[in-house]
């Protein structure tokens, strides 16, 4: 299906539609190696070669990025006071409509997916889809083995909110691996608080069967592969 040139450029870059139109009128855009100055030119995204400032635009209907979120950055598209996860996007990955699929608290680190696919994010975050989210929690003291039973039964928070059943495994060194399916505000921290623990640090390492790439340093990101993209909807089976 063909679409307007200015709309296509805006969808594939960080330019607004207005700025895309200006780039076209300023002779910065070619279609099939011919300069085009008409913003309403119709192009076939999958077959026409569109270039901006000499750089070909590879058509991607949607993008999916794996970010190793650092502490001190908020999971938002914009914030007047704080640095956001979108500020971490390098220029080659920027395009309009990208947002964090879900959120991690400002001081929580680890796996966060950035995308412009609203349906994908909705399916991943919907409680009805039962997508597991796995974290490594560092606590203020060594956790008791009883946390496994408590998480398996479902923990009632201080305000009376009842959390769904989850999983918890003691790892030693004041750490525990926790898997939950919900995404309530500060949920992991509040669940441990209900058991008498304080979470000192929290890192998300897995969503569904998609694990955080250990090669990514804090603040780094990369595109998901075609094989990785659907893994968030698969159940992760812990190997014995």
Image: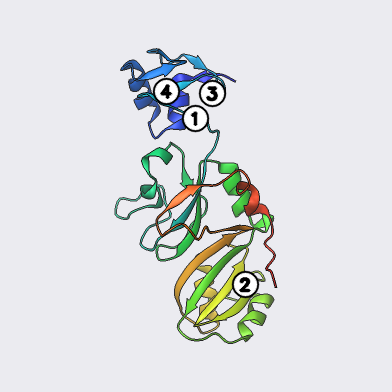
Name the residue beneath numbered marker 3: 45
Q: Would residue 153 appear left or right of 213 to someone viewing this image? A: right
Name the residue beneath numbered marker 1: 58
Q: Residues within 10 Å of mark 4 (few under 14, many from 20)?
A: some
Circle 1: element type? loop
Name the residue beneath numbered marker 2: 162
| Disc 1 to disc 2: CB gap under 8 Å | no
Q: Would residue 82 appear left or right of 175 to someone viewing this image? A: left
The reply to whether residue 67 is visible in this rendering is yes
CA–CA distance between discs 1 and 3? 9 Å
Mark carried by residue 51:
4
| Disc 3 to disc 2: CB gap under 8 Å | no
Instruction: Report x, y in % for residue 68.
Output: 46, 57
Give the number of the mark in front: 4 or 2. 4
Q: Looking at the image, is mark 1 or mark 4 earlier in the sequence?
A: 4
Give the number of the mark in front: 3 or 2. 3
| Disc 1 to disc 4: CB gap under 8 Å | no
CA–CA distance between discs 1 and 2? 47 Å
Circle 2: element type? loop
């Amino acid at each position: 299906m063909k679409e307007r040139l200015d709309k296509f450029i805006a969808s594939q870059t960080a330019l607004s539609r207005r700025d895309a139109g200006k780039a076209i009128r300023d002779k910065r855009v070619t279609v099939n190696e011919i300069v085009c100055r008409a913003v309403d030119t119709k192009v076939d995204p999958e077959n026409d070669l569109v270039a901006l400032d000499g750089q070909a635009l590879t058509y991607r209907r949607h993008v999916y990025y794996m970010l190793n979120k650092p502490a001190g950055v908020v999971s938002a598209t914009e914030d007047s006071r704080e640095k956001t996860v979108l500020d971490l996007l390098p220029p080659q990955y920027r395009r309009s409509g990208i947002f964090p699929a879900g959120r991690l608290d400002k001081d929580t680190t680890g796996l966060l997916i950035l995308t412009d696919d609203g349906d994908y994010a909705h399916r991943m975050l919907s409680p009805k889809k039962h997508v597991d989210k796995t974290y490594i929690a560092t606590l203020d003291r060594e956790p008791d083995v009883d946390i496994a039973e408590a998480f398996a039964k479902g923990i009632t928070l201080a305000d009376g909110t009842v959390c769904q059943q989850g999983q918890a495994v003691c790892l030693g060194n004041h750490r525990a691996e926790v898997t939950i399916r919900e995404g309530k505000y500060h949920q992991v921290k509040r669940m441990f608080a209900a058991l008498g623990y304080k979470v000192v640090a929290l890192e998300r390492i897995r969503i569904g069967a998609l694990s955080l790439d250990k090669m990514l340093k804090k603040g780094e990101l990369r595109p998901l592969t075609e094989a990785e993209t659907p893994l968030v909807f698969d159940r992760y089976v812990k190997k014995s």
